[in-house]
Amino acid sequence: MPKRLLITPAALSWPQGEAMAERAAALGTEIVRLKADRLTGLPDTYRDAKTTMAVVTASPSRRRPQPIPPSADWRFDLAEGCPAHCAYCYLAGSLKGPPIIRAYANLPEILAELPPLLGQGQVTSRNAARMAEGTTFEASCYTDPLGIEHITGSLAETIRFFGAWEAEAQLRFTTKYDAIDPLLALPHGHRTRIRFSVNARAAERFEGGAPRVAKRLAAMRKAALAGYRIGLTVAPILALPDWAEAYDTLLADCGAALSGTPDPDLTVELITHRFTEGSREILQGWYPGSALEMDPAQRTRKTTKFGSIKYVFPRERMAELRASLEASVARHLPQARILYWT
C-alpha cells in the first residue's frame, strides 16, 4: 500500500492514470499531482522509496517489447519496481534510481505494440517443443503485477485483451501474491498462464512483504479451477539446510494444491540463485544483517553473453540440485512440463 503516489500530467491524460489516482486516494494514499512530466521529489531512503508509487507514461522505447529467453518470446512492461522486500531480489542493480514503483498509464499504446509480433519470437513461436503455446508474451518481469493490481487495474485489462485476441498467443506473468479473486471471473479465454513463484519454507524469511507460500498455493488452486493455465516458478533455488527434503516437500504441496483441478497445462521453471557484485552490494545495503549467503568465494564466477559477471553455484552443487528437483517434479507433478533449468 503506497503512502504517496506521484502522477504526471501525461499520465493524467489517460483514463487509466486518473483511475489509478482515484483507487489509491480511496485507500488513503497521498496523491501528488506533478506540474511536469519529469519525476521530482523522489525519496532517497529505501524505506520511503518502497512506499512510493509513480504513475507515468511509457516512452516509445519502454513500450517496445524485447526478447526474453528462455521464458517467453517477448516481454512488455505494465510497471517497474516491486512492492515486496525479497533479500535476493534480482531487480537490485537492474533498475536505476531509488526502488519506487513506476506504473504506466498508457496501457492502450503498450498493448498496441503486441499484434505485429505474432509468430515472430524465437522461444515458443518457432520452437517445436513449445510451439503449442503460440507466441508468448511475458507481462512485467520488472514488477509483480498482481501485487499492485488493486491500484493499477492493468493486469485485468491485459487479461481481457488476450482473452479477446483470436490468435495463437499467450500471456504469462509471475507473482508471489495471492489476491487472485478479482481475476477469476475474467474472460481470459484460456490464453493466460499465471505462474506462481514459490520456494521452500525456510526461504520465506527472505521474502518480506510477500504472502506465505501456502497462501500462494491456495490462490493457484483457485486460478486452476477458474480455467487459467498454471505455471510454477521455483526461484531462486537455494542451498538451504536439508534442501533436498525442503524442495521435495514444496513440490509435494504444489501437487496437493492442484489435485482434482481441470488440466492446468502445468509448466515448471527451475531457477537457481545467482548474484552480481552490483546486486550484492545493493542488497546488503537494503537488508543489512541478512542471513542469505552471497559469498563469491563459495560460488563459481561466470561471464554472461553480455559480458557481465555473475556468481552461481559450483558445477557439482548445480548438478545435485538439478537432479533432485527434477526427480521431485516427476514424482509429485508428473503431468508438468519442465521448461528450463538455469
Image (spheres, rainbow, N blue to C red):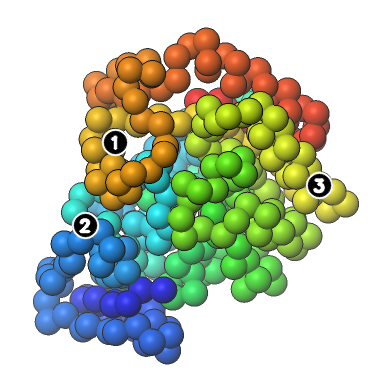
Q: Position of residue 154 (x, y in %)?
A: 46, 68
State the image quarter where residue 339 is shown. top right
Q: Residue furthest right?
A: 260
In the displayed structure, does residue 204 sit left or right of residue 261?
Answer: left
Of mark 3 and mark 1, the one earlier in the sequence is 3
In the displayed structure, does residue 308 sit left or right of residue 250?
Answer: left
User: Looking at this view, is 338 or 109 the one in front?
Assistant: 338
Residue sitting at x 39%, y 68%: 108
Residue sitting at x 16%, y 62%: 44
- Label 3 – label 1 distance at C-alpha: 36 Å
Specify whether residue 62 is in view: yes
Q: Position of residue 255 (x, y in %)?
A: 78, 43
Q: Which residue is mark 1?
A: 280
Callout 2: few (<14), some (14-19), or many (20+) C-alpha neighbours within 10 Å? Answer: some
- Please name the amino acid that badge 1 sits on: Arg
- Label 2 – label 3 distance at C-alpha: 40 Å
Q: Which residue is mark 3?
A: 256
Q: Residue 194 shows which numbered tag?
A: none
Of mark 1 and mark 2, the one earlier in the sequence is 2
Q: Which residue is mark 2?
A: 98
Q: Is 263 located above or below residue 324 in the figure?
A: below
Q: Is 119 located above or below residue 50 in the figure?
A: above
Specify whether residue 112 is in view: no
Callout 3: few (<14), some (14-19), or many (20+) C-alpha neighbours within 10 Å? Answer: some
State the image quarter where residue 185 is shown. bottom right
Q: Position of residue 13 (x, y in %)?
A: 27, 81
- Please name the amino acid that badge 2 sits on: Pro
